[in-house]
Amino acid sequence: MWPFTSSVDFIGMDFRTDVHSHILPGVDDGFRTEALSLQALDLLAQAGVRQVILTPHIYPELYPDNTPENIRHAAEAFNAAAARTGIICRTAGEHMVFPGIEAMFRKDAPGMVLSMPGSHVLIEMSYAYESPGIRDFIFHLNVSGYHPVLAHPERYTFYQDVTEEMETFISMDTALQLNVLSLGGFYGKTAKAKAEHMLEKGLYTYLGTDLHSLRQIDQLKSLRIKKSHVKAVERLLENNDALWNS
Ligand SMILES: [Fe+2]
């Protein structure tokens, strides 16, 4: 019971589409077993989610087996089992930007890219330092017909003037994706402050859970959205639906 309605439950808003998750089991640091992943989808379905994009980490140095072929193969088996949860899953990837990554994104081999609908490509960096050459890579994506989506910019500790840095990315046709749990302070005070600031500035386009564990579903259930942020979050939820349909 919340007698003072200065905030609302995130679960209860129109959260139908998650664009960032590590639910595909056994391929990265997310869910370990199919049983746990199906439990996660059941819980998300109860919360109103209908569509999930599976975005396992794509980073050859850490996950050498996560080739597009292997991920699609793993997803095919999982999606068949996931159908009974009522959630539709699509397969993409969260690409760590590393030197040489351009080779994975060739115009003449689109089948080799784990992109989201509408040729959107989810990218990430280390939390500790900016990926060398990230702007060149974004330019490469742009000219190759892809639309970059930068995951959880509020979590990158090396950006001090986050507004200026993010406006640069946005000017390069790069959409920003909020980890919604950042608003609850689950990644620390600094990430929360940056997330709120960027949300208020209208810098984000999408919202994701970046779900790695059942514990984070409990966090989602406890997440409250400030009333002053509700409209901005609703806009991101609508954009998520539009991305799914793009
Ligand atoms: Fe992620």
Image (cartoon, rainbow, N blue to C red):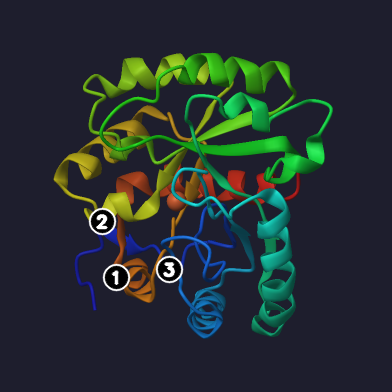
In the rendering, at what x and y percent does residue 33 appear? 50, 79
Find disc 1 in the rendering and name its residue.
222
Residue 226 visible in the shown view: no
Respond yes or no on whether mark 3 lies under 8 Å from ligand 1: no
Amino acid on which the number 2 mark rests in the picture: Gly
Q: Residue at x 36, y 67 (%)?
A: 220
Distance (Cα) linking label 1 and label 3 = 8 Å
Numbered circle sitting on residue 11 = 3
Distance (Cα) linking label 1 and label 2 = 9 Å
Amino acid on which the number 1 mark rests in the picture: Ser
Q: Residue at x 80, y 42 (%)?
A: 111
Amino acid on which the number 3 mark rests in the picture: Ile
In the rendering, at what x and y percent does residue 24 appear? 57, 67
Q: Toward which corner of the image does residue 165 lie, by quadrant? A: top left
Is there CB contact under 8 Å for labels 1 and 2?
yes
Find disc 2 in the rendering and name its residue.
184
Q: Earlier in the sequence, mark 1 or mark 3?
A: 3
Tally the numbered discs: 3
The residue lying furthest to the right in this view is 108
